Image (tube, rainbow, N blue to C red):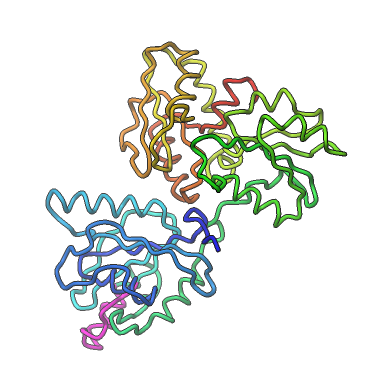
Amino acid sequence: MTPAPESHRLHIVLLGNRNSGKSSLLNAIAAQEVSIVSDTPGTTTDSVSKAMEIPGLGPCSLVDTAGLDDSGLLGGKRVKGSLEALKSADIILAVLDADSHEIPELPETTVPVLPVINKTDLCEPSALETFRARVEEKFGRAASLTVAGAGDGIGSLLQTIRESVPEDWDAPLLTEGLLEEGALAVLVMPQDRQAPKGRLILPQQQTIRELLDRKCRIVCCDENTLKATLDSLKETPDAIITDSSVMEKVSALKPEGTVLTSFSILLAAAKGDLAYFKESAKVIDSLTADSRVLIAEACTHVPESEDIGRVKIPRLLRARAGEGLAIDVVSGRDFPEDLGAYSLIIHCGACMFNRRYVLARVRQAREQGVPMTNYGITIAYIKNLL
């Protein structure tokens, strides 16, 4: 059985100072040793993620982070990694040490922050009540009490998490507003050298599963068999969903009355800000040989000769703006803090990222006044198909 992808898991991020018991708490929730636990401050140096199913919550990703009070050159980098993990958080567990009575300053956020006072066995009852009152005043809600090493209070904490899940935590359906139940969809899926052997890429998998759940009828083919596929159908398909790289070829074969879109554009609508992406695409017309563009990939991979983000899109852009157009490529969690040097950001479909993380990047681009679009919209715009 294939587990739920990371992008469709509820992200629960544990934040706090060093030695507050974040790693112990994660291990207690997961009921196994995921993070290394030690009395030495700073044991957790990089974010540690554990995918698991939690009753009443479904697929979750628990993320342990380095202490927010870490210091020094390496400590600063570790704190930066913790704050990066925060961008994908749907719920934050602010883990507080009952023994030290310290309350760290957390970054501003729009997601629920649940205070958890850990190591309560090390604190006198009266001192604990005083600390608990301070925590409630700080966070505006009562704190959960745990002794993570013994597993105490975990059940109550999980119930608090269940009651605090934001309604908008998950991305909307990819095909929402596109197809009704029972509709006929043709999926055009080129299987190039970068496609995983024996498997479909994640956007194709997710779209097929969603359409099956919605009782739609699905016909799959590649771009070379599309014409024969359409000729064999007894009715006109309601929609064609294609890989962006062959959209122009597919468009030429699209029957009258059939909606055409791409997997990447569906992802842009479900995870990002489609209106902003569409408006930002217009900047392509004003790019010159002196401009600079940032291309951001969610996944890390060794690029093939015709990689869409590193070869195909740069080729299309330079054909319009000039060969001097500067293009930088980042992948995975790498993303510049200062975007001011760029005229445009072009993001992949981000099937590997959850919606919260994609929107954090969109918000960063907006705040810095930098237009941002994605692969599918870029290709559709350049080909006059948007």
List x then y, in percent, for residue 124.
21, 87
Q: Quadrant of residue 61?
A: bottom left
Q: Which image quadrant: the C terminus?
A: top right
Q: Which residue lies furthest to the bottom in this view?
A: 125
Out of 222 and 6, give the one closest to the viewer: 222
List x then y, in percent, for residue 281.
53, 26
Instruction: Please count the marks in the image.
Output: 0
Query: Magenta stretch containing residue 127, yes or no?
Result: yes
List x then y, in percent, for residue 316.
50, 19
Q: Is residue 81 left or right of residue 327?
A: left
Q: Which residue is drawn at 49% across and 43% down?
A: 350
Q: Which residue lies furthest to the left in this view?
A: 72
Q: Which residue lies furthest to the front in this view?
A: 198
Q: Is residue 101 left or right of residue 266?
A: left
Q: Residue furthest right?
A: 234
Query: Magenta stretch containing residue 126, yes or no?
Result: yes
Above or below, comparing residue 142 to residue 256 in the picture? below
Chief SS of the magenta region: helix
Out of 77 and 349, give the one closest to the viewer: 349
Out of 279 and 3, give the one closest to the viewer: 3
Out of 242 and 193, give the one closest to the viewer: 193
Q: Which image quadrant: the N terminus?
A: bottom right
Above or below, comparing residue 378 to residue 50 in the picture? above
Above or below, comparing residue 369 to residue 10 in the picture? above
Instruction: Read off the magenta span.
Output: 116-134
Q: In this view, does 252 lie to the left or right of 145?
A: right
List x then y, in percent, for residue 315.
47, 19
Q: In which quarter of the image is residue 224?
A: top right
Above or below, comparing residue 207 to residue 9 in the picture? above
Q: In which quarter of the image is residue 113?
A: bottom left
